[in-house]
Amino acid sequence: MASAVEDLVDLLDLEPIEVNIFRGAQPREENPSLQRVFGGQVAGQALVAAARTVDAHERTVHSLHAYFLRPGDMTIPIVYDVDRIRDGKSFTTRRVVAIQHGEAIFNLRASFHVHEEGLDHQVEMPEAPSPETLPRADEIEPPTGGRLWSRQPVDIRYVDGPPWARRQSPSARQLVWIRADGALPDDPVLHTCIVAYASDYTLLGASLVPHGASYFRDDIMMASLDHAMWFHRPFRADEWLLYSQTSPSASGGRGLAYGGIFRRDGALAVSVVQEGLIRPVDPARVSPRYRG
């Protein structure tokens, strides 16, 4: 049986069906905990579609901005329509619309840039224990029983323990180690798309950290609304990356989260910002800290 990470590589290998049009498959095995297409999947596939229309040897993606428009149907493929907005001397811009049942479920704009030398600085990487000393998230039993995730292609390790076990966080920060759960081919585009896939796993949950709430413990509905990423320095998705997450604000039924993805040597590889819906299903069952 193929490993989960091999299945992810296959999932990101889109089928070209016409010029600028690609078809993305769904996972081979259904995840009963998901009621809609995982946001990281559609973001990763859309980025693959955009990159397929760009000379990857000359230009690499430096930013993407995306909106989740409708829940994706897990029972049918997704069609990706690429608009080649601009091919400039230094920058290339693409717009991708993901379509199911004749309607847009997601759109993405991505910008690609030729390599240039310039100023170089970054914030410091937070201190964190080695990922080898921490348990895998899919080996921890949540309050609902069973497993948090099963057969996932990304190895996730929470630095401060699982979300449902944390009642408060003085730093209001969430640290998570991530990496692809297996060796990957030497294809920079694939590594970028897998990190785009993985970036949606835990980030929005940082909006609950200041309130001592948890999606797994409290009755809370959460969904990604938009997602932005900036790619600063090269990385490999099959090597450990520290995902430092904070939330500057939550209001109006929405939460905003910032993420910095660092290589193990301390280099800041990617910056991520996501806003999502955070809606208590039954406010009476949510802790006073969350409500206040």
Image: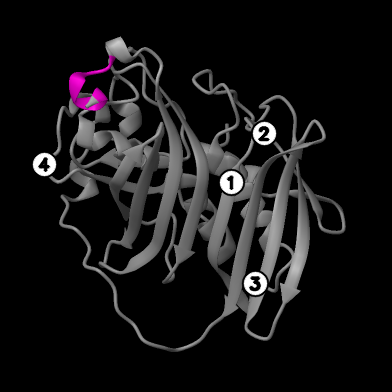
Could you tell me how far apart the alpha carbons at marks 3 and 2 are, in whole angstroms?
25 Å
Amino acid bearing label 1: Tyr
User: Could you give the CA–CA distance between mark 3 and mark 4, rounded to whole angstroms?
Assistant: 43 Å
Residue 105: percent from the left, percent from the top? Answer: 68, 38
- Crowding near the residue tagged with mark 1, few <14, some 14–19, many ≥20 C-alpha atoms within 10 Å: many
Image point (55%, 39%), residue name:
39
The secondary element bearing badge 3 is classed as: loop
Tell me the number on the disc at residue 56: 3
Q: Tag 3: residue type?
A: Ala
Asked if residue 67 can be seen in this view, the reply is yes
Q: Residue at x 41, y 31 (%)?
A: 253
Q: Earlier in the sequence, mark 4 or mark 2?
A: 2
Name the residue carrying label 4. Answer: 170
Residue 26 is tagged as: 2
Q: Which residues are magenta?
A: 286-291
* Residue 44 in the image: above or below residue 250: below
Q: Is residue 224 left or right of residue 14?
A: left
Which of 120/155 is in front? 120
**Sequence order check, earlier mark of 3 and 1:** 3
